[in-house]
Image: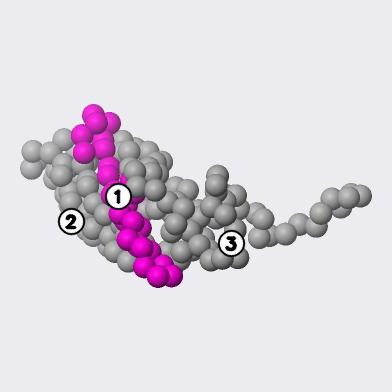
């Protein structure tokens, strides 16, 4: 440690510098998640984690014999692409998160091995309570052709900004 440098404080080691509270969010905010090409390795990892062993998800010849161009992604394999932890949202709410309340998904089109998916979360609900609030996010996944393959929801319970937390970011 040299001369006037401040000692290291692990509380300052954050991916997102500004902590956000329920009151700091606005309808329409969008949180893009990383795109992913659904490779055979992704399929194998999901099969190992889920225990799902139906051949439609891991046997290319079975799929072709049943009129599909290749292995079909399991619906949950597509839904997990919308996990908030893949993006910046959970880093913004480290101190304000009380609970992950619910998740739902509608599967609109098939996703096959080799497809690339583009997940995103868009804030579409703000329901304030006295000391907390519910933040709702629409979850979407598009494929490389721009087709919506999944439409869903996530809901989180966040703490409202405490008096000692200071002003909202940018205000």
Residue of label 3:
165
Asked if residue 43 lies in the magenta stretch, the reply is no
Q: Which residue is most to the right?
A: 3
Q: Secondary structure at mark 3?
A: helix
Q: Secondary structure at mark 2?
A: loop
Which mark identifies residue 124? 1
Q: Earlier in the sequence, mark 1 or mark 2?
A: 2
Q: Quadrant of residue 101?
A: bottom left
Judge depth for marks 1 and 3 and give the one in front: 3
Q: Quadrant of residue 115?
A: top left
Highlighted range, magenta: 122-148
Position of residue 10 measured from the top left corner of the image (x, y, whole percent) = 68, 60
Label 2 neighbour load within 10 Å: few <14, some 14-19, many 20+: few
Position of residue 89 measured from the top left corner of the image (x, y, whole percent) = 45, 51
Q: Is residue 22 left or right of residue 79?
A: right
Q: Secondary structure at mark 1?
A: strand
Q: Residue at x 58, y 62 (%)?
A: 165
Residue 100 vs residue 62, the one in the foreground: 100
Which mark identifies residue 54? 2
Judge depth for marks 2 and 3 and give the one in front: 3
């Amino acid at each position: 440690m040299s001369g006037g440098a401040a000692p290291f404080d692990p509380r300052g080691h954050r991916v997102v510098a500004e902590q956000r509270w329920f009151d700091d969010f606005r309808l329409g905010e969008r949180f893009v998640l990383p795109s992913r090409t659904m490779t055979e390795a992704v399929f194998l990892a999901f099969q190992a984690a889920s225990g799902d062993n139906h051949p439609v998800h891991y046997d290319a010849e079975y799929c072709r014999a049943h009129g599909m161009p290749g292995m079909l992604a399991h619906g949950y394999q597509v839904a997990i692409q919308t996990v908030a932890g893949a993006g910046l949202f959970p880093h913004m709410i480290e101190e304000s998160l009380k609970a992950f309340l619910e998740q739902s998904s509608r599967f609109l089109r098939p996703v096959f091995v080799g497809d690339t998916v583009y997940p995103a979360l868009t804030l579409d609900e703000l329901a304030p309570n006295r000391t907390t609030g519910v933040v709702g996010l629409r979850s979407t996944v598009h494929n490389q052709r721009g087709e919506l393959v999944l439409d869903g929801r996530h809901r989180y319970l966040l703490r409202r900004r405490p008096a000692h937390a200071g002003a909202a970011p940018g205000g």
